[in-house]
Amino acid sequence: MSDNITNILVVGVGGQGVMTATEILAEAAIALGHDVKKTEVAGMAQRGGVVSSHLRFGPKVLSPQIAPGSADILLAFEAAEGMRWRHMMRPDALALINTGNLAPPVVELGLFEYPADPVGEMRKSGARVFAFDASAIANGLGDIRLGNTVMLGAIADHLPFSAEALERCVLQRFARKGEKVIEMNRQAFAAGRAAAAEAQRTQDVREAVSA
Amino acid sequence: MAAVMPAPAQSRLLMSGNEAVARAVWESGVKVAAAYPGTPATEMLEVISTYPDLYSEWSVNEKTSLEVAFGAAMAGSRAFCAMKHVGLNVASDALMTLTLTGVAGGLVIAVADDVGLSSSQNEQDSRFWGRFAHVPVLEPADSQEAYEYTKLAYALSERFQTVVILRMTTRICHVKALVTVGERVAHVGAGFQKDPARWVMVPGAAQKRIPLMFQREAELRAEAEVSALNFVEAGSDRRVGFVTSGPAYMHVKEAFPEAPVLKLGLSYPAPFEKIRAFAATVDNCVVVEEVEPLLETELKAQGIRLAGKDLLPRSGELSPPVLKPAVGRLLGEAVAEPEQKPARAVAPLPVFPRPPTMCVACPHLGVYYTLSQLRNITISGDIGCYTLGFGHPWNALDACISMGASMGMALGLDKGRGESDKDKKIVAVIGDSTFLHMGMQGLLDIVYNKGNVTVLLLDNRAVGMTGGQDNPGNGRDIHGEEAPRVDFAKLVKALGVKDERVHVVNPYELPTLFKTLRDETKIPEPSVIITNQPCVLIQDYHKLKPFTVIDDKCTGCGNCLDTGCPAIHVTKRDSVVKPSGKTVDLAFVRIESSVCTGCGLCVQPCAPDAIVHADKVIQIKALQRH
Ligand code: SF4
Ligand code: SF4
């Protein structure tokens, strides 16, 4: 983290809840006394297009944008979108990637190809990546919309504050939606956290083997 | 958004610049607020509409919104209107005269420049309108300043009896940062004071107001010299000092924390003497501004020696990594890449493009699908979601410039036909809200001048692109309350389109749509085809039972893909050689049933009836098991 500022870039496809997730991360940072800036581009891009949300927090934040090569964490809700934003990462940054694919119409029409192995490409470029299928986890828990919370669970152990602090903010969001929704999100958060830990374990093994 | 409204004074809230402005408008005791939605300005009015005790509205266009706000300001009340940069072009007609009358109650126009063009047809610098109209421009740099400057703008507006432009950019409007808010202070309007010499701008009266406008401008310049909004931050490294405004200030501070900075909050009229004195204290002076070299040109004309756009980009957003190497070059430094460390900066990995596209089951899908099936037509388009029809798979839009322009352009395409397009059918496409915004006049012109144009009026009962805001076409006002609803068929008939040339069509009924379009384009008269299904993002839209594809029946023809519905995905590609010797590409598909709304569009071009309701398949499977 440079100059005591943490840069988190959350990316995905319009409609995936990228902005909400970033908002919750921002709330957690505020609750812990940080200065916060959060920005994204809205409007036309939201119609199934590329969405990226910048979150910066620390003692004092000036520029709202994360500069290329300076994101501490890349949280990608879609695998190819992780690739698209790879260049934003610091050399020692971590990418948390949902391997659930979303191909856009131009790919479905055969005009472009979806990369065969987006995560592999990112690793080849030297990035440290923890990847797992957050969409499948969310579906397994009964609602694709839980993907959001799964991803937040995944990032929880990699922040400069405790996972519990983030979980509190996540659950607060759903406080008025009833115990069932809260419980589902609690599970989604835990599942995301476990998936990231598991991805880290296999990644560590891989690195140990290749070293 | 929801957290903003009722928070008590002294709360620290995470607010976007738009939300911060809205809060300040409310706290300033504003009585009337109006806007037409437009990214990145939309949320200002959306949030204002949630506050009690002030009147808010979606106007039909920006000019009207300014006129409404002005009326209230004329009556002595505080008033507000918001728009995106291109909106001020529309409102400029009103602006250029109300700079002469001035205002009684405070009037602030918040203008949001789409620097970097995230969702606009051009990138323009609205600060020019301040110069053009000789009215002051305030430029906040973040949410807190957006909040504070809005309140100051009202004080300034009333003190100098002028409209004030609050210039925002995407990176203020849509950046969330912490804001400490205050309390609402009531503001009581004096009521309208009759004064024809001031409020009736006939030539004789207007002429007398012009010197007053210039006098006001001179007084404002003097104010800028002493205003606390224009301040110097002394720095320890005097090799280069910066004159800057708006969010560019943040980038400067981050990139050059040791450099002296003169920040202009009240940037027009610029405080020349303050800037001259500042420039004398540094070795090099650099103006950092988004987008145009506006200040730079003015300051150079004053004989102040400085650099600006010779170093920095002329378009797009500025940021610390843009500033650092540019200024480093000026200082003759070996220019390092943005991040020094062992950072071998990673080049972007190649990935397919992901352009925005229409929503699953969007009512416009059928229209563009049909247009793409028609031959020999030229399609003149407009601003809104249906602009996306220019992309794949439809490729069915030939032109688009600005809101409401589709019909005038279509008439021009008709009247200006060349030899090669003498038999072309001309179609204009426009949305409901867009039609009401500026389109009606274009249609009237087509009718009046006997144009041979078929107009597709896509009524989806919302301002779709900006998120489904209400308008006179859907019978709800800004609060979601019932309002009179325009009858488009009657309206276009009233503009002179013949009864038999007006058709209302369900855009999901492809055969009817196709036949109506083909027939109407053949008839050399103005005709209007109105489609009548709601945007899928608004409350009027109701989901039906989702569809699925029976794999065994799918022949891979890919016809359903041509509708462009994003719920349809290819599972396998293949190719076959036909008896004719021609190779045909096949694409076998599946439907993502969790997002399919059951609109039934893709079912229609599917020849082998491979697309059926999902529950039927489950039933069939269940039967097989027994
Ligand atoms: S927002 Fe509405 S109008 Fe726009 S693409 Fe989606 S469904 Fe269509
Ligand atoms: S029926 Fe077909 S076109 Fe309509 S939403 Fe479902 S997949 Fe899309």
Image (cartoon, coloured by chain):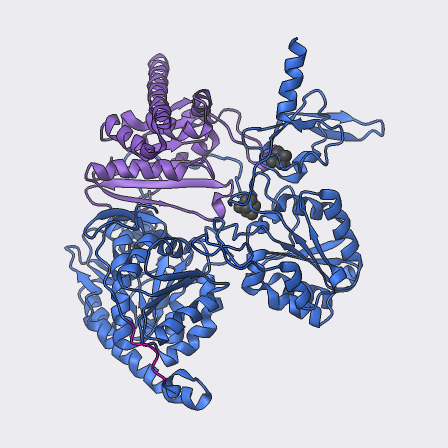
Chain colours: A purple, B blue
- Left or right: where B72 falls relative to B12: right
- Left or right: where B528 falls relative to B294: right
Specify whether residue B192 is painted magenta: yes
What is the chief secondary structure element of the magenta stretch?
A: loop
Instruction: Write down the region rendered in magenta.
Output: B189-194
Name above or below for residue B477 compared with residue B165: above
Q: Residue at x 48, y 51 (%)?
A: B466
Q: Position of residue B371 (x, y in %)?
A: 70, 48
Q: Position of residue A132 (x, y in %)?
A: 42, 22
Specify whether residue B307 is painted magenta: no
Name above or below for residue B486 compared with residue B118: below
Which quarter of the rendered image does ligand 2 occupy? top right
Looking at the image, which is closer to me, B605 or A76?
A: B605
Name above or below for residue A100 compared with residue B485: above
Q: Position of residue B482 (x, y in %)?
A: 49, 55
- Left or right: where B584 falls relative to A33: right
Q: Position of residue A207 (x, y in %)?
A: 35, 17
Q: Residue at x 36, y 86 (%)?
A: B195
Residue B215 in sight here: yes
The answer to which image quadrant residue A30 occupies is top left
